[in-house]
């Protein structure tokens, strides 16, 4: 078992959290991380870019002037892509960029991303985050007490609007619940601030997956 310090709101160590060794010190699979991040970024694309072809541009299809005898280049109608206000040649059309990734690969990527954060000491476990009413100043003070700066992802064990409203005006600080953690968010943020309950719930879910499916292969 790996022992992780649990901090209070003041940044003092108030206890230790036992976590599975294969959860905290799992092998980081860079190939899987790359595959999943590329798929996530592709799935974020709306794919709504669209241009009009020459057949879709409003205008007559009449040939502008006769083929020969004018001393000018040969032209067709006004909708030609070579003319101003004409159609677009080989322009984009609405399409789906979606990539399908197996669940087991996505889980392995999340495990690798979390393990990388643990092994680089970029995960902070706090006993509890309780804010009576939304107040940005209180959240800023909390982060300062814990020595956290840069891009921070706060991971909660349950929805908490007061925490969300207190953090939403702080640049590069985001909030999510433990069940919404994904590979891209973990890697994009410099540090993770997790409540003790959130870390326990996530580890329990991970261990249940291993028990039901067998060991996840981290050497692929």
Image (cartoon, rainbow, N blue to C red):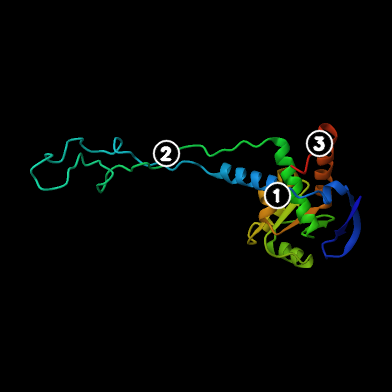
Asked if residue 66 lies left or right of residue 162, the reply is left
Cβ atoms under marks 1 and 2 closer than 8 Å: no
Between circles 3 and 1, the one closer to the viewer is 1
**In this orientation, which residue lies closer to the viewer: 211 or 173?**
211
The first of marks 3 and 1 along the sequence is 1
Asked if residue 69 lies left or right of residue 46, the reply is left
Q: Visible in this render: residue 187?
A: yes
Q: Visible in this render: residue 130?
A: no
Residue beneath label 2, please? 93
Numbered disc 1: secondary structure: helix
Percent x, y of residue 65: 12, 41
Badge 2 crowding class, 10 Å Cα cut-off, few under 14, some 14 to 19, many 20 or more, is few
The correct choice, above or below, for 113 with respect to 60 in the image is below
**In this orientation, which residue lies closer to the viewer: 22 or 195?**
22
Residue beneath label 3, please? 209
Quarter of the figure with residue 92: top left
The first of marks 1 and 2 along the sequence is 1
Residue beneath label 1, please? 30
Between circles 1 and 2, the one closer to the viewer is 1
Badge 1 crowding class, 10 Å Cα cut-off, few under 14, some 14 to 19, many 20 or more, is some
Asked if residue 101 lies left or right of residue 107, the reply is left
Percent x, y of residue 60: 20, 36
Quarter of the figure with residue 5: bottom right
The first of marks 2 and 3 along the sequence is 2
**Quadrant where the C terminus is found in the figure:** top right
Quarter of the figure with residue 79: top left
Residue situated furthest left in the rendering: 69
Numbered disc 3: secondary structure: helix
């Amino acid at each position: 078992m790996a022992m992780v310090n649990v901090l209070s709101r003041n940044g003092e160590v108030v206890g230790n959290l036992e976590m599975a060794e294969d959860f905290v010190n799992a092998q980081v699979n860079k190939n899987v991380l790359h595959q999943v991040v590329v798929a996530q970024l592709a799935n974020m694309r709306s794919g709504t870019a669209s241009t009009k072809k020459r057949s879709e541009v409003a205008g007559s299809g009449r040939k502008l002037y006769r083929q020969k005898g004018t001393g000018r280049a040969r032209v067709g109608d006004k909708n030609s892509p070579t003319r101003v206000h004409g159609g677009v040649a080989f322009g984009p059309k609405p399409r789906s960029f979606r990539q399908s990734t197996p669940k087991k690969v996505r889980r392995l990527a999340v495990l690798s991303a979390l393990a990388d954060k643990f092994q680089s000491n970029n995960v902070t476990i706090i006993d509890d985050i309780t804010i009576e009413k939304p107040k940005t100043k209180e959240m800023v003070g909390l982060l300062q007490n814990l020595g956290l700066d840069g891009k921070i992802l706060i991971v909660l064990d349950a929805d908490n609007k007061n925490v969300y409203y207190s953090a939403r005006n702080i640049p590069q600080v985001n909030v999510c619940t433990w069940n919404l953690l994904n590979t891209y968010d973990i890697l994009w943020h410099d540090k993770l601030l997790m409540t003790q309950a959130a870390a326990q719930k996530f580890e329990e879910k991970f261990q249940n997956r291993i028990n039901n499916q067998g060991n996840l292969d981290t050497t692929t």
